[in-house]
Image (cartoon, grey):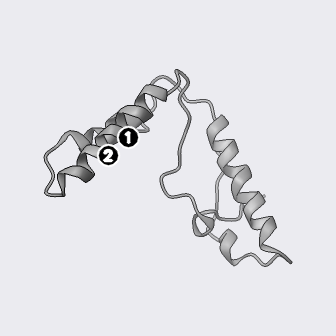
Amino acid sequence: MQRAIPGRSLKNRSFESGKKNIEIACNIAKRLHQAQLSKDTDFPQIEELLATLDKKWEIPNEHLQKARFLKQQLLAKNSASKVLLHGDLHQDNIISQKTTG
């Protein structure tokens, strides 16, 4: 894994247009989704994250039922191949890479 030394976030990069920032962010998301995951990865699985919807919540029942329905739909469409998903990917969390020599 490459080492990122905190520097400037993508949000603070000044390009002539914001289009370049969007292209960079999209390319990073694409690369994350193509990353090979080992079988013994410590990253949480989507099923684990969505299991919280099975608990009792003090929210309107119609909202909880809708969330559970969407969870079932998502998991039914879940492919056999797993991809890495960044839980908070935005331009402030994309840091420029600096190499050390």
Residue type, label 2: Ala
Q: Is residue 55 visible?
A: yes
Q: Secondary structure at mark 2?
A: helix
Q: Give the camera-side residue of 58 and 65.
A: 65
Q: Give the camera-side residue of 91 and 5.
A: 91
Q: Secondary structure at mark 1?
A: helix
At horizontal 53% and vertical 50% (from top left) the residue drawn is 86
Q: Where does label 1 land, which residue?
A: 70
Looking at the picture, does residue 70 appear above or below residue 39?
below
Quadrant for the C terminus in the image: bottom right
Q: Report the disc number at residue 67.
A: 2
Left-right relation of 51 to 20: left
At horizontal 83% and vertical 75% (from top left) the residue drawn is 17
Left-right relation of 20 to 85: right
Q: What percent of the width, then of the height, locates residue 45?
A: 40, 35
Q: What percent of the width, then of the height, locates residue 31?
A: 69, 43
Q: Give the camera-side residue of 87 and 70.
A: 70
Left-right relation of 60 to 5: left
Q: What percent of the width, then of the height, locates residue 5?
A: 64, 64
Q: What percent of the width, then of the height, locates residue 36?
A: 62, 30
Circles 2 and 1, Cβ within 8 Å, touching? The answer is yes
Residue type, label 1: Leu
> Image quadrant of residue 81?
top right
Q: Determine the CA span between mark 2 and mark 1.
A: 5 Å
Q: Give the camera-side residue of 58 and 14.
A: 58
At horizontal 15% and vertical 52% (from top left) the residue drawn is 57
